[in-house]
Image (spheres, rainbow, N blue to C red):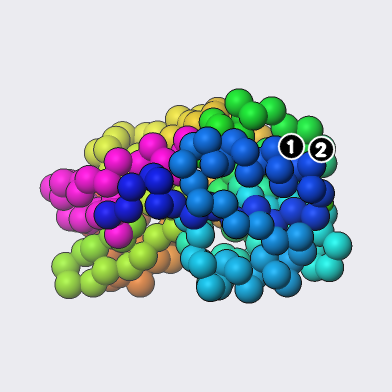
Amino acid sequence: MKAPGTMKALIIEDSPEFFLAAAHVLEQAGFEVLGAENGTDGLDLAAQQRPDLVILDLGLPDIDGLDVCRRLRTTTDSYIVMVTGRRADQDLAAGFAAGADDYITKPFSAIELDARIGAVMRRSRRLIEPVNATDLRLDEELRTVAFADAVVELTKTEFRILEHLVHRSGEVASREALAEAIWGTGWDGVSHAIDAHVSNLRSKLRDLGWTGKVVSVRGVGLRLVAPELAS
Ligand code: CA
């Protein structure tokens, strides 16, 4: 089990001003901070150092930030916070689709970044009790979900979604509540972003051999349906 003080953050950003400001906030929060000024170096460092958190500028000099994000997502389950120049919903949607967990816009405030990294650190590392209705066993420390003898790893965002749904025990969870659980904010443009993560979660649950379902309730939200009730 890692204490927050040994967590690593990687900042991939070509602007020295932003790098220094973000590094300061992260160091204050107890992270060991690594930096890369371009996508190539960032991907190399991420592979070597396996950071817990990646702050990723989408406007990099060599590789498109979204490509960096996609590549990171295939090799790491780091919590990825994308940095965008403006809050355009289509940019954010593309970022979430590429696997980002959260975003900040430039210019950012220290408080805003602090709130984002809080999402990485606030996960307490406890084992979540099996829920009778689903028989899924969630392990927050390993970030896995198990069913019968099978185990699958989840991304941080997928884990948050599943954890939230499991706690709701079959009741509908609204998209706003899920957004709050995942990103700490009920940003109203997130529903399609959640859907991308839910779709990945569904296929992982199928891979487990679990026959329950994550059901979308139109206009309301999502709920978990136990195997014996799913048909
Ligand atoms: Ca830049």
SS of the residue under disc 1: strand
Q: Would you say 140 lies left or right of 106 here?
A: left
Decide whether residue 64 is among the magenta residues: no
| Residue 69 position within the rendered picture, expressed as x and y whole percent measured from the top left | 66, 62
Quadrant that contains the C terminus: bottom left
Q: Looking at the picture, which amino acid does disc 2 mark? A: Arg
Question: Mainly helix, strand or loop, the magenta region?
Answer: loop
Residues rendered magenta in the picture? 118-142
What number is the disc on residue 167? none
Of residue 42 and residue 73, the one placed in the foreground of this image is 42
Quadrant of the rendered image containing residue 12 = bottom right
Q: Looking at the picture, which amino acid does disc 1 mark? A: Thr
Of residue 85 and residue 134, the one placed in the foreground of this image is 85
The answer to whether mark 1 is within 8 Å of ligand 1 is no
Q: Would you say 14 lies left or right of 109 here?
A: right
Decide whether residue 132 is among the magenta residues: yes
| Residue 184 position within the rendered picture, expressed as x and y whole percent measured from the top left | 50, 31
Residue depicted at x 81% and y 49%: 15
Quadrant of the rendered image containing residue 113 = top right
**For the residues bearing labels 2 and 1, Cβ distance under 8 angstroms:** yes
Residue depicted at x 44% and y 52%: 7
What number is the disc on residue 86? 2
| Residue 22 position within the rendered picture, expressed as x and y whole percent measured from the top left | 66, 41
What number is the disc on residue 105? 1
The answer to whether mark 2 is within 8 Å of ligand 1 is no
| Residue 40 position within the rendered picture, expressed as x and y whole percent measured from the top left | 73, 72
SS of the residue under disc 2: loop
